[in-house]
Amino acid sequence: MSNRRIGQEGGQGNVTAVSFHFGSRTGLMRAIITGHGEQADRIRQRHVAATGDSGDIREWVGCLVRPVTEHLASLGTPSRQADGVRRVDGGPRVPVCGRPVQKR
């Protein structure tokens, strides 16, 4: 997606908005991932506190996995963040809520 389209999708008439605010597309992605990571970390803190001194490895693995899935679920559908994670991760694009995948 072009910087121009990112600006348009974000409601910006200024086509240089991405570069102005984030420095680059990499800066934009970093800001998005950081923002979502911070939210997942807050959820993770709750899970770690609830796990306490448990020696059950499944509970500790859950402290790593559940925060991300809970956060993505809280975004509703379709989740642009979930789709972005799939793309950054190199995974295939899949239809969201039965919508066809748009060609790039």
Image: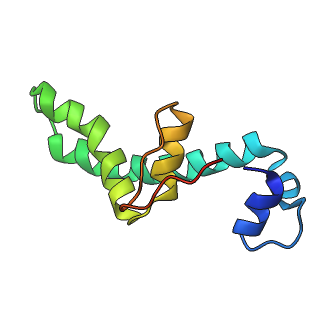
Please give the name of the residue rendered at 66% of the width and 49% of the height, measured from the top-left corner. 31
Res. 51 image quadrant: top left
Judged left or right of residue 59, residue 16 is right
Res. 61 image quadrant: top left
Judged left or right of residue 82, residue 102 is right
* Viewer-nearest residue: 73 or 101: 101
Please give the name of the residue rendered at 50% of the width and 42% of the height, measured from the top-left corner. 85
* Rendering coords of residue 88 (x, y %): 56, 36
Evaluate whether residue 38 shows in this view: no
Judged left or right of residue 86, residue 97 is left
Evaluate whether residue 30 shows in this view: yes
* Rendering coords of residue 100 (x, y %): 46, 57
Vertical placement of residue 9 versus 57, above or below: below
* Rendering coords of residue 89 (x, y %): 50, 32
* Rendering coords of residue 27 (x, y %): 75, 44
Vertical placement of residue 15 versus 101, above or below: below
* Viewer-nearest residue: 31 or 90: 90
Please give the name of the residue rendered at 88% of the width and 62% of the height, measured from the top-left corner. 15
Judged left or right of residue 40, residue 48 is left
